[in-house]
């Protein structure tokens, strides 16, 4: 640790924040980045929207994100960050900030690892401001927050070791995303005429459980944040969950009632020996006889179905609009029972996406295990390289 030096955030990067408003969303054009796109150290553009070229010019007056900038959430999803990739024209969204690294002192990818590492995450927890509705990072104070960094050569060595894992995770995510895009294309309403109400092909599961009263050590918790963070259930003690949840006893499709225009449709298969709980913000849907969750997901995740649900929401706040269960169940979808051979293709593609994301969860766990050890100097780079070589 003698080669590591103390810095402040402001010494190694410039801090910028994004706009404090939201432009009109479009179907194409530059990206208007959402904090929901910050997923486990990666930028997932499918969680963001587009805006017009005219609005893009206005929304980048303060700063235009460049490759190697660190994007981070300064409200609600504190601790989330990602590297700005090349070849993407985008502006910062609401509640999103940006760190522009001084590359003579810090490698951009290493600054991201430093941000995500336990030491800086603890700094965020200790120095955040607790608001009436959300917590936030005080951007005016952020430049004074402490960091500890090694020299640039060691930074590059650590980035190379962990980068192999991140590269494999990115490849797997592209595989999963491509498979799901093919599923949605296969099940698109453009290709199929017969439609049915959602309730005709699935059942709504309503059984709830109080986690505080469960006599088990661990549960799988399917929550909106877990979906946004990579579609992996959190394994936690039930004592940490403070409100009733839906009990999930079998494979199901979770459909978010909250802001249904956001694509949160989750095809899940709970572990056989661990109780599974789902947020009450989801509808827990199980397919009726002869239909799999993959077929159900293929029609419930269609953009036109989300649009139909969004037209039925209640609530005055844009951030807390919900669709009633009865309204969702009465909404029409493509009937997946007509798919035939295309249905079997959907099954194959769904399994491919499932395997890719399952491997990603294991790789992310390994990366998150190695990260604090490398960042503290407890693990040598050459030892980490050997571990990564055996898994990547």
Image (spheres, rainbow, N blue to C red):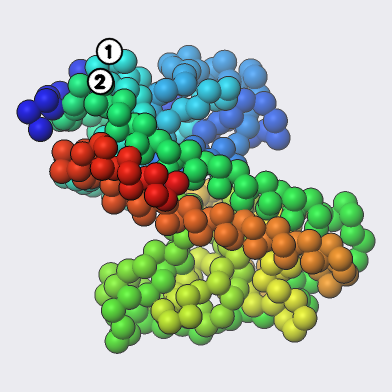
Q: Are marks 1 and 2 in contact (CB under 8 Å)?
A: yes
For the question of whether residue 211 can be seen, the reply is yes
Residue 118 rendering spot, x and y as whole percentages: 22, 45
246 and 104: which one is in front? 104
**Label at residue 4:** none
303 left or right, relative to 51: right
Q: In which quarter of the image is the N terminus?
A: top left
Q: Which residue is drawn at 63% across and 32% down?
A: 50
**Residue most extreme to the right:** 193
Q: In this view, does 9 lie to the left or right of 254?
A: left
Residue 81 versus residue 149 in the image, above or below: below
Residue 134: x %, y % from top left: 33, 48
Dot 1, crowdedness within 10 Å: few (<14), some or many (≥20)?
A: few
Q: What element carries label 1?
A: loop
In this view, the residue in front, 317 or 308, is 308
Residue corresponding to mark 2: 152
Residue at horizontal 27 percent and vertical 12 percent from the top: 104
What's the distance in space between the residues labelled 1 and 2, CA to CA?
8 Å
Residue 325 vs 109, above or below: the answer is below
* Residue 153: % across, % down: 26, 21
């Amino acid at each position: 640790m003698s080669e590591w030096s103390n810095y402040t955030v402001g010494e190694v990067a410039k801090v910028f924040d994004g706009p404090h408003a939201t432009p009109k969303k479009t179907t194409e054009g530059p990206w208007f980045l959402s904090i929901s796109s910050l997923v486990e150290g990666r930028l997932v553009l499918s969680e963001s929207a587009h805006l017009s070229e005219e609005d893009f010019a206005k929304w980048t007056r303060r700063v235009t994100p460049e490759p190697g900038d660190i994007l981070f959430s300064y409200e609600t999803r504190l601790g989330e960050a990602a590297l700005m990739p090349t070849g993407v024209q985008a502006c910062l969204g609401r509640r999103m900030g940006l760190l522009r690294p001084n590359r003579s002192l810090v490698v951009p990818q290493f600054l991201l690892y430093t941000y995500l590492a336990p030491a800086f995450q603890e700094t965020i927890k200790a120095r955040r401001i607790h608001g009436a509705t959300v917590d936030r990072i005080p951007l005016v104070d952020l430049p004074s927050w402490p960091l500890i960094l090694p020299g640039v050569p060691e930074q590059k060595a650590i980035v190379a070791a962990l980068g192999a894992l991140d590269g494999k995770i990115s490849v797997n995510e592209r595989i999963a995303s491509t498979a799901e895009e093919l599923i949605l294309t296969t099940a698109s309403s453009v290709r199929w005429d017969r439609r049915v109400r959602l309730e005709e092909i699935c059942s709504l599961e309503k059984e709830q459980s109080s986690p505080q009263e469960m006599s088990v050590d661990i549960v799988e918790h399917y929550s909106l944040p877990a979906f946004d963070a990579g579609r992996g259930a959190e394994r936690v003690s039930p004592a940490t969950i403070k409100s009733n949840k839906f009990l999930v006893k079998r494979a199901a499709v979770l459909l978010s009632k909250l802001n249904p225009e956001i694509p949160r449709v989750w095809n899940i298969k709970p572990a056989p020996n661990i109780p599974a709980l789902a947020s009450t913000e989801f509808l827990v849907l199980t397919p009726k006889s002869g239909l799999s969750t993959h077929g159900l997901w293929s029609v419930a995740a269609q953009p036109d179905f989300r649009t139909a649900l969004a037209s039925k929401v209640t609530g005055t706040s844009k951030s807390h609009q919900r669709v009633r269960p009865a309204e969702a169940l009465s909404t029409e979808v493509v009937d997946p029972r007509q798919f035939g051979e295309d249905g079997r293709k959907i099954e194959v593609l769904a399994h491919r996406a499932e395997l890719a994301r399952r491997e990603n969860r294991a790789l992310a766990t390994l990366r998150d295990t190695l990260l604090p050890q490398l960042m503290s100097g407890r693990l040598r780079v050459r030892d980490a390289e050997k571990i990564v070589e055996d898994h990547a």
